[in-house]
Amino acid sequence: MSALLLERRWSFLLLLLLLLLFSGAGGASEVVVSAQQKLALTPHIHWYYDASASATISQVSADTARFQGRLDNASLPRAAGAYWLWFELRPTAEAEQRAWWLALPYTQLDEIDLYVRDGSTTPWQHFRAGDQRPLAAQPLPYLPQPVFPLSLTADALTDVFVRIHSSTSITVPLTLWQRSAFEADQLNNTLVNGIVYGVLIGLVFYNLFLYPTVKDNAYLWFSVYLGAFLLFQFSMAGFTRLYLLPDWPALADRSASLALWLCMAGGLRFTQYISLSQQYAPRLHRLLSAMVLLALLMMVPVALLGPGPLFFVLPLFGGLVALLIPLPLIAAWRAHYPPARFTLIAFLPILPGVVLIMARTYGLVDTTFWTEHLFSMGTAVAAVLLSFALADRISFLRNEKLAAQAQLIDTIHAADAAKKRFSTQLINAQDSERKRIAEELHDGVGQNLSFLASSLNRLAQGHDSVELQQAKQVSRDTVNEVRAISHQLHPYILDQLGLVTAIESIAERIDEPGGLRCRVDISDGFESLDGETELHLFRIVQESVSNAMKHAGATRLDISLQRRQEMIHLSVTDNGVGLKSGAANAGLGVASMKHRAVLLGGTFELKSITPQGTRVVVILPVEA
């Protein structure tokens, strides 16, 4: 008898051990639903992978032994087949009196089929959702995420089967909510999304408005990056499908991937511009350019084939982008480019969200509030900081531009000063050479010609030869011509008697009855001028008179030299034919007069006057 009891006890213990070991493989654990506002179902879900994606609810529910153990987290490996999820709900009497919603807060699943049944004899309730199905097919089409209303009966076991089929990442954070609690949670999500979207939209338009003004491509690509990220977040939250493309499920399904590829291209291009990578990191610049091109090209197959075929590339490319973006900024920072520092700091808030999204994509963490919002919140903060970085870049480039302009101005001033010194030296050298030639003509050639004329006079005494008379006349004419040339080259009367007498002598030589009449009007106060100023003013008068005689065809010439307070006003006016088109800036004579006036710190003007004639006006300070 004792042996029989002992054998029964061991049999009972063995049976209990087997039940404990295999309890997870043959049946789902019951989830007791009472008055809690929110119940995470992931720890209670059993799963089964249907490789052919052809199993029906009748087949699956009839053979629950195929289901494996519970989910470790809410993420499942991406696969071509379909996943089936199974759990059982047992509501209490208190739970029956409340409205319950089953929410799946992940909007990127292609097909979702929910089957619910109370007891084994009632028919299955079938709900459909998924971003490749029309929005109207969802049981609650006014919500951006898949939500299914459930009717629970107290103490009745409710079987729930969920079929998931998707070509991209598969995340199934199923949560059972009381309706009131779910709506309150949605308000919190709406607040967070509203703040993030508001910041991003404001920054997109702000930088787009700035771009035509500053003409800096960094602003344009920053706007592309922010706009694409905004569209990505909008799609991930389900708003693109809900508000923009409710009747275009295929396009809505592609929107998140397309936006993310464009976002990465815009972020890389923006990094190139703000880090000046072409200057500070040329090799990285070429690599980033290739990645920008690749990201833009990847948008083509995604648009044509959907996100599924190349989805495996997306997280790898995104991780590479996150690793490469800091490198040109670090290189620029090391080269003492200040905006790189602010940009590096600005990108830091994005990194935790990127890491969390990648971890969720590969099933390393569950979907939580932080996996849903950390990336978008970090990007909003980064966008604000990047705006400061752009402002710092503008300030830096403006300072560089001002420094370059100042250096250019200094160079121009130095060149002008050198040009002025050269011109002054050239004119002084010309005047000195004229003086030397005039002295040689006067003292050398003039003396010899005078001696020759005296000799011819003596030889001609007592002789009335025609040849001698002609030689005497030629010698006298030559002496006069040499003296005139010597006077033109250097006015000795200017050295001996001053500027006023020298100008009056010009007028006396050209004033002829019945020919060119010349009037001179000179005020007092020119006795103290230095020799250089007198010489320049005399040359201007001399050149003006010469031009009037040679080109104007004038019959009257007025020379006015006036001292008005601390300014000298010189004008030479004729009544000739006036200026031809372009003549005001043509000719070496005009250029020489203008430059002499500038050398004295004054102004020069050559203009036509009414009814006819030309006027040369020079105004310069007395202290010049």
Image: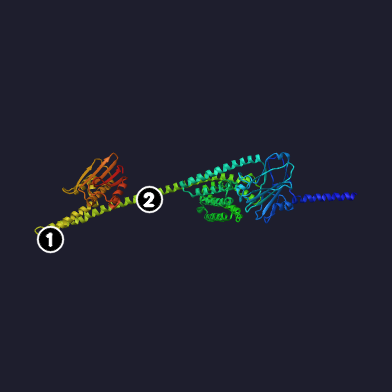
In the shown orientation, is residue 246 left or right of residue 486?
Answer: right
| Distance Cα–Cα, label 1 vs label 2 | 61 Å
The three-letter amino acid code for the residue at tag 1 is: Glu
Quarter of the image where one finds residue 558: top left
Q: Residue at x 36, y 49 (%)?
A: 416
Mark found first going from the N terminus, 1 or 2: 2
Mark 1 vs mark 2, foreground winner is 2
Nearest to the observer: residue 352 or residue 490: 352
Please tell me whether mark 1 sits on a helix, a strand or a loop. helix
Q: Can you give x and y, in whole percent of width and height, for residue 381 in the image?
A: 57, 44
Residue 373: which disc? none
Label 2: few (<14), some (14–19) or many (≥20) C-alpha neighbours in 10 Å: few
Label 1: few (<14), some (14–19) or many (≥20) C-alpha neighbours in 10 Å: few
Q: Is residue 530 above or below residue 315?
A: above
Asked whether the beta carbons under mark 1 and mark 2 sit within 8 Å of each other, the answer is no
In the shown orientation, is residue 138 left or right of residue 12?
Answer: left
Residue 467: which disc? 1
Q: Can you give x and y, in whole percent of width and height, for residue 339 in the image?
A: 52, 47
Q: Can you give x and y, in whole percent of width and height, for residue 434 in the image?
A: 26, 53
Nearest to the observer: residue 269 or residue 420: 269
Residue 415: which disc? 2
The three-letter amino acid code for the residue at tag 2 is: Ala
